[in-house]
Image (tube, rainbow, N blue to C red):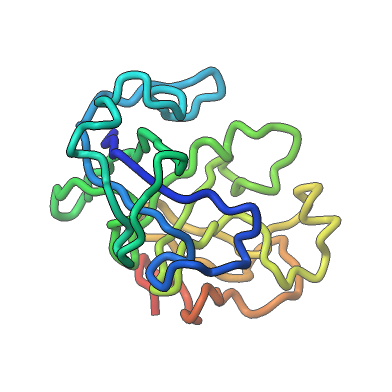
Amino acid sequence: MRRSLRRYKSQADYKVRECPANGYHDEMVPFDEVPAMLDERGCYRVSDDDVSDAPPRDDARWPRQCRCGYQFAAGDEWQLFQDLLYRRVDTGEVMTLRDAPPGALWRARWMENLGGSSMWVGADGQAWMCKTPGGEWHIDGPASNCTDKEGQTRGEHKCWVRHGVAPDFTIDKNGKTCSAGAGSILCGSYHGFLQNGYLT
């Protein structure tokens, strides 16, 4: 995992966009890399969201200002932020999910341990995510335009049906599904398909 020193200004109402860069004042810089550990739910983590083993607050490595120019106040948040590191199977490059390019696929193992419902996983019990040009897409999760939300919640169908083995997934409506769409994904500004491992 990569840990970063993060400063941000907490807002009670996130509809107020104070920062033209992020929406709210937020900045972080890489600090170190440490082995990732599993918690009791099978989720990866290193430590709690505190700064117990971070440098003191007067250390110059802490961000002093947001990229928009806002100067962080002493009462703004201090956090030792954690990001899992992933290795690309095609190039060997190591990166965080926030730096992953469109087309990246990864297992969301924490969703596999939610229990009580199969609405978050595919028929194989796995939960997969895809980075699209418009943002992250939970392939095995519910679609916002699902025509049978109660059935989806009970795990009676999938809004998208996943076929194949990663990374060569094809996503369509061939299986027990609802009548929403034709297997395409609308994610942010992106609208397309995942077929034979490629976003189209």
Q: Nearer the viewer, residue 149 or 16?
A: 16
Quadrant of the snapshot with the C terminus: bottom left
User: Is 32 positioned to the left or the right of 28 in the image?
Assistant: left
Image point 37% across, 38% down: which residue?
A: 81
User: Is 159 positioned to the left or the right of 46 in the image?
Assistant: right
Q: Nearer the viewer, residue 43 or 142?
A: 43
Give x and y (percent) for residue 147.
Answer: 80, 71
Image point 44% across, 73% down: which residue?
A: 134
79 in relation to 87, above or below: above
Give x and y (percent) for residue 62.
Answer: 25, 40
User: Is 110 positioned to the left or the right of 76 in the image?
Assistant: right
Q: To which quarter of the image does residue 82 belong? A: top left
Q: How many marks?
A: 0
Q: Furthest-right residue in view?
A: 150
Image point 28% across, 57% down: which residue?
A: 99
Quadrant of the snapshot with the N terminus: top left
Image point 21% across, 35% down: which residue?
A: 31
Give x and y (percent) for residue 177.
Answer: 72, 64
42 in relation to 199, above or below: above
Give x and y (percent) for residue 107.
Answer: 44, 44
Q: Nearer the viewer, residue 16 or 35?
A: 16
